[in-house]
Image (cartoon, rainbow, N blue to C red):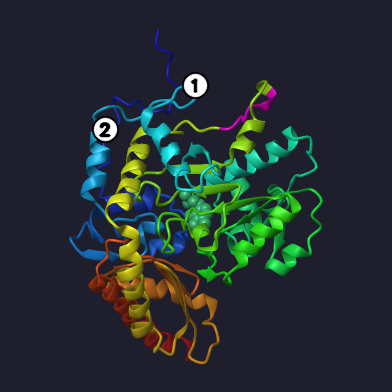
Amino acid sequence: MTPSKAPGFPSIEDSTVFKGSPADADLSHVWHPFTQTREWRDQEPLMLVEGCGARLRDAKGRWFLDGNSSIWTNIHGHRHPRLDAALKAQIDRVAHTSFLGFSNPLAAQVCAELSALWPAGTLSRAFLSDNGSTAIEVALKMAAQFWMLSGKPERSRFVAFQGAYHGDTMGASALGGIPLFHERFANWQFPVERVSDFEALQNLCVDGIAAVVIEPLVQGANQVFVWPKGLLARVRSWCDANGVFLIADEVLTGFGRTGTLFACEQEGVVPDFVALAKGLTGGYLPLAATLTRESIFDAFTGGADRTLYYGHSYCGNPLGCALALENLAIFREENVLSQLNTLLIPAFHSALERHLAPLPEVHEIRKCGMIAGIEVRQPGGRPFEAGLRMGSRICLAARDFGLLTRPIRDTIVLMPPFCASKTDLEEMAGAVGEAIRLCAAKGDSVTQ
Ligand SMILES: *Cc1c(COP(=O)(O)O)cnc(C)c1O
């Protein structure tokens, strides 16, 4: 017998397809990430409907350059023929099967291929999950449980850096060091030792430290803060000297963003855990990997009490894994990294310097490979009044010059996909420049 339905619940058979416009649906029913609702309502939502290479088209037929690679995920461009084909081929086999107690050939191959990208015998095990936050979350649990299993349960403290961003789930955000994002949940988060630089790390009492977590080379969400050269290697040495794990968050920097496949390579560092996500599928589907050492994996082998009780319904998702394999094949076969280093990164940096450095409102251009943060201030160096929301205004204005991107406070982030042409890069930098000019002129009239 069908259970009777409580009054007030519409039945699915009688329910109707939403009849309003997509904008109505959005404004009435959607809650957007990292978005102030009041500001969102001030303008018509930009509905993206199609992509091609470095460009995206909205529902009104306008094409834009995708200036931040669709929130830092896209690597080779939209509708890449090889990625599209890999996804379609897998769709015709199966979309999802469980990774709990079963395996699938694509996921197994992804783990093997990711391991092979690190020095032999180092990061030989990979745990697949859904996104950057879960990739960090699992590294934290593995590190904490490893010390329990190794008879050192007192090693339970995590160290993270000021300005760090490691994701938004409660555990990952406990590591976060950006007050605006992280401070208000402090009461619910586990305590984390926070340091500003290498000297502060050295001054810590090492007793009870489980691991140090760092974004190698650059803190993206911290308005694109670039670490001093050599810092990562020094942190690695300090961890080695003190028997502390190093967790590298390569969620943003992985897959060529900084000019090498992984940012850690540039300082010869092999971490004990590395978190990968955003670009892993070329920016097509959510998939993440946490790589670690065989010795850490081995500690979890034994009775049920040694099991890592952690997982997600979509671990090892075959569609995501098919894309990850194709993404790696593109890197292997299409000279992506050499193109980046000989052509694209130099062209990107030069376009930024020529179009933006001369503007009086451009306070600093911070760059690391295909990542750039353009910080705007009042001419003379005083920050714009926060209430002006100059970064947001500039990014909104940039749409009229054909560019989509998003600021972090008053830093405009540019992070182009690697399929961008030299002309695209010129246009991106040019659009930011035009938008800054326009907003600075208007800003004067607001402040006067
Ligand atoms: C984006 C990001 C994360 C979080 O990844 P999600 O997929 O958004 O959960 C973690 N760390 C860094 C460095 C990131 O840039």
Where's residue 170, x and y in %?
61, 46
Residue in the picture at 28% in, 41% down: 18
Q: Residues within 10 Å of mark 1 (few under 14, many from 20)?
A: few
Quadrant showing the N terminus: top left
Is 259 located above or below residue 136 in the figure?
Answer: below
Q: Which residues are magenta?
A: 305-310
Residue 395, image x, y percentages: 37, 71
The residue at the point 58 percent across, 72 percent down is 228
The residue that mark 2 highlights is 91
Against 12, is 120 above or below?
Answer: below
Q: Residue at x 69, y 37 (%)?
A: 146
For badge 2, the amino acid type reads Ile
Q: Is residue 225 visible?
A: yes
The residue tagged with tag 1: helix, strand or loop? loop
Q: Quadrant of residue 204?
A: bottom right
Question: Residues under labels 1 and 2: Cα distance?
Answer: 22 Å
- Disc 1 C-beta below 8 A from ligand 1: no
Residue 335 part of the magenta-drawn span:
no
Q: Amino acid at mark 1?
A: Gly
Q: How many marks?
A: 2
Q: Given the current orientation, which residue lies at the most extreme front position?
A: 120
Q: 140 or 396, which lies in front? A: 140
Asked whether, in this view, residue 345 is left or right of residue 266, the answer is: left
Residue 101 shows which numbered tag? 1
Mark whose residue sits in front, 1 or 2: 1
